[in-house]
Image (cartoon, rainbow, N blue to C red):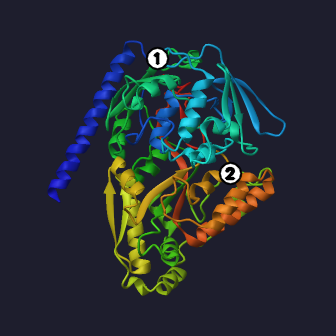
Amino acid sequence: MKSKKLCALLLALALTTALLAAGCGGNQQSQAGGKILRTANGAEPETLDPRTAVGVPESMILRQLFEGLCTQNQKGEPVPGVAERWEVSPDGLTYKFFLRSGLKWSNGDPLTARDFEFSWKSALSPELGSKYAEQLYYLKNGAAYNKGNAKADEVGVKALDEKTLEVKLEKPTPYFLFLTTFWTYFPVPEKVVAANPKWHTDPKTLVGNGPFKIVSWTHTDKIELVKNDNYWNKDVVKLDKVVISLSDNVKTILDAFENKQLDAAEVTPPLPEIPRLLKEGKLKNGPYIGTYYYCVNTAKAPFDDPRVRKAFALAIDRRTLIDNVIKGGEAPALAWASPGLPDAKAGDDFRKVGGDLFKDNDVETAKKLLAEAGYPDGKDLPPVDILYNTSESHKVIAEALQEMWKKNLGVSASLSNQEWKVYLQTRNAGNFQLARSSWIGDYADAMTFMDTLTSKNGNNLTRWGNPDYDKLVEQAKTSSDPAVRMKAMHDAEKILIDEMPVIPIYFYTNKYLENPKVKGVIRDALGAVYYREATID
């Protein structure tokens, strides 16, 4: 125990030293006339290839390095990005995007419509194995190509010339323009990718088209970006440099922020500090379309029994957890899809229409279900382990659930924490029973939650599948009638909660640290962060 504490102390000191060094260097350059934003991302990105990226740590960096056909304005709305305008056919199935003149990659090479065609088709290619390939299933034959049932030239994206991209969809998709702001739809440079499959791992070869370009990447420490002079809208970029800390030690990040070594941090600080930071105005809290949950491996005992899964879900006192542990104004998650998503009628919220799908802290029902599964008061239950990525916040939440399950069910659960990359590998390989997880919406429609848990979705790590659920989600995808779409998704969500392959804990709020001197950062309720128009006094 003593040696572990010493290692933890040395690690914290090392991280603090790195942050201080980065901050001091930033101050020196700032005094020399440059504007430098020092921020924290929360973890080492798994990849900086937008075609294969999945997590939030990747998304913030990718939005600085790349730009899609559309981007977002200060209200979070899709506006022209690489495409200066577009046309949509009356049936909503064909889009024609007209790219801006003189577009260039950060290395000076011309960017053309062909790069978009290549990027989208390669993201769908079975060979690449992108977990987010389903984001491109909206394209005609996108799913068929990804599953090996169609050819690449049958996919509904085609460069008509260097400046014109034609996109054909499987069905009308009202939120398609918003989808083009998402990183899976970003272009990658065909010439660079063809020459070096590992192009995205080295700052020397990582070429983008966004407002910034990468100049250094010290793994598990920091990434440095500088203004991209080849960006088409470079005149709006006021920052000369962005230094991004990759530490996942939120206590170290908070200390650096309060010591003025960081200007902002896109992370939630240690939970006990949240009330103070909110009161002092250092922590900002906005709407966020996302759910904090535990992913359940339904292939591993005892969670191969839905009664056990539901018993664990019902034996959580979410309100007490939020009020006494998390303390950030979150709401108990008593369903899967979070608030903030539209329903069939204008002005209606999908979550409010669907309501709560189970009771919070329903210990009586939980105990009954566990007994029915053959484990009265937790007797004879196989060992249970909770996996979470290293974070003090995730730790205290896991400890709270551990205590609740002991008290309410008689279950003794162990805790396992792993560094971010190892945790991702463990979770992806299915070597867990319960894994701390989160899902942040990709676009403002309930489908962003529902299709994540279909049987063959690459982001479904639960090993759960239900044909009726899949059919309802597919019905919602293929119908253009809002009433039909929403009813199908509400019905699907009821199936999901009845079988509980995920245990929703709470609905997020968007918490981030930011110095009042920082202005112009674009943030939306889906977690998008853009430093394109940011500045610091």
Q: Is disc 1 placed on a helix, strand or loop?
A: loop
User: In this picture, is 498 found above or below 213?
Assistant: below
Tell me which corner region of the image, top left, top right, bottom left or bottom right, holds residue 255.
Answer: top left
Q: Could one spot residue 224 in this view of the protein?
A: yes
What separation in Å lies between label 1 and label 2 (alpha carbons)? 39 Å
For this view, does 519 lie left or right of residue 92? left
* Front position among marks 1 and 2: 1
User: In this picture, is 94 found above or below 195?
Assistant: below
Question: Quick one: label 2, few (<14), some, or many (20+) residues within 10 Å?
Answer: many
Tell me which corner region of the image, top left, top right, bottom left or bottom right, holds residue 111.
Answer: top right
| Image spot of residue 470 (x, y percent) | 64, 61
Q: Name the residue under label 1.
A: 107
Residue at x 34%, y 52% (from the top left corner): 390
Q: What quarter of the picture does the N terminus occupy?
A: bottom left
| Image spot of residue 142 (x, y percent) | 63, 43
Residue at x 19%, y 49% (from the top left corner): 7
| Image spot of residue 130 (x, y percent) | 50, 44
* CB within 8 Å, label 1 to label 2: no
Give amino acid for label 2: Leu
Q: Name the residue under label 2.
A: 341
Residue at x 59%, y 66% (from the top left corner): 334
Residue at x 41%, y 31% (from the top left corner): 197
Q: Which of 77 and 147 is in front in this view?
A: 147
Give amino acid for label 1: Asn
